[in-house]
Image (spheres, rainbow, N blue to C red):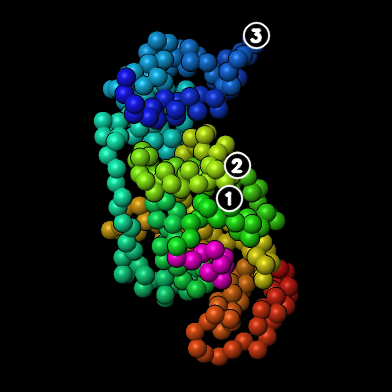
Amino acid sequence: MSDEPNLLGSYLRARREQVTPESVGLPRAGVRRVAGLRREEVAMLAGISADYYLRLEQGRDRNPSVQVLESVARVLRLDDAGTAYLLGLAADRPRRRRRRGRRETVPAGTRKLLDVIGLPAFVEGRYFDVLAVNTLATALSPRLRVGGNRLRDVFLDPAERALYAGHADLEAVAAQVVAGFRESVGTETDDPRLIELVGELSLASEAFRALWARHDVRVREGAVTVLDHPEVGDLRLNREKLAVGGAPGLTLVVYHADAGTPDEEKLRLLASYAATGPGASAGGKDPAGGAGMVSRARELGG
């Protein structure tokens, strides 16, 4: 028996536990010793034998067909991202032990874009490391700095968590981040960087351990983000996530406000403070400093 991790089986078990009998039209009769669906129920609904499904979860079937996996994905109520991840786990197994430690490099053109875009923006790597950032993004969150890690910040940094606590369900934000992280790293789970980061967070955060064990997968995409910023108050921004051309795995993250809203004016205040406040390059000083910005933000409803 191979000592290779049974990632396909782990994923199937985790997702099976999230599906209730009622959600797939089965009665909840008698005492159930398992969370979610039983193996035989998944097999029945997918149109395969219980023994074959058991072999899948135990890692004894090395070449399941796409048709079988898509049937199982339907029963487990996987979306497109989850189905793609399931298919990738099966297809990638013959080369599972190959390790890669590729270096992530931000293209020069993307770095120049950060300097002229006029909006908070940064480049995020495959492991959610911050690889490049502009000053306005750092004004939005001081944790946005080269060398930082977005996953670590959301679970371990109290100031970062406080940005979301006032308006968003922090648990929902954390769940989205973990699901996006799993989609980003894909099936190459033997990468030393991934092992180090997941190990660190698993030891330090019970919430991360629980979410990682769910095996949720979510495509990284744009969304509305509501922040409780310590200097400008309530801030509602659109967050876009764009693939960086020529740099697989890298994402350009840009924040912008709806035109004509108080949020747009608050971004201008942050930009002004980032350019003239403490830590800015040589130039004019804002005589009111941060206090002036807070006062103006309050006028805007912050």
Residue at image x 54%, y 19%?
A: 37
Quadrant of image for the C terminus: bottom right
Q: CA distance from mark 2 to mark 1?
A: 8 Å
For disc 3, the marked residue is 30
For disc 2, the marked residue is 207
What amino acid type should be assigned to the residue bearing mark 1? Phe
First to last magenta residue range:
138-146
**Count of numbered circles in the view:** 3
Judge from the rendering whether residue 90 lies leftward or rightward of residue 162; answer left or right. left
Residue at image x 59%, y 89%?
A: 285
Residue 171 lies in quadrant: top right
For disc 1, the marked residue is 155
Residue 279 lies in quadrant: bottom right
Give percent across and percent down for residue 192: 37, 46
The secondary element bearing badge 2 is classed as helix
What amino acid type should be assigned to the residue bearing mark 3? Gly
The single residue placed furthest to the bottom in the displayed view is 284
Asked if residue 142 lies in the magenta stretch, the reply is yes
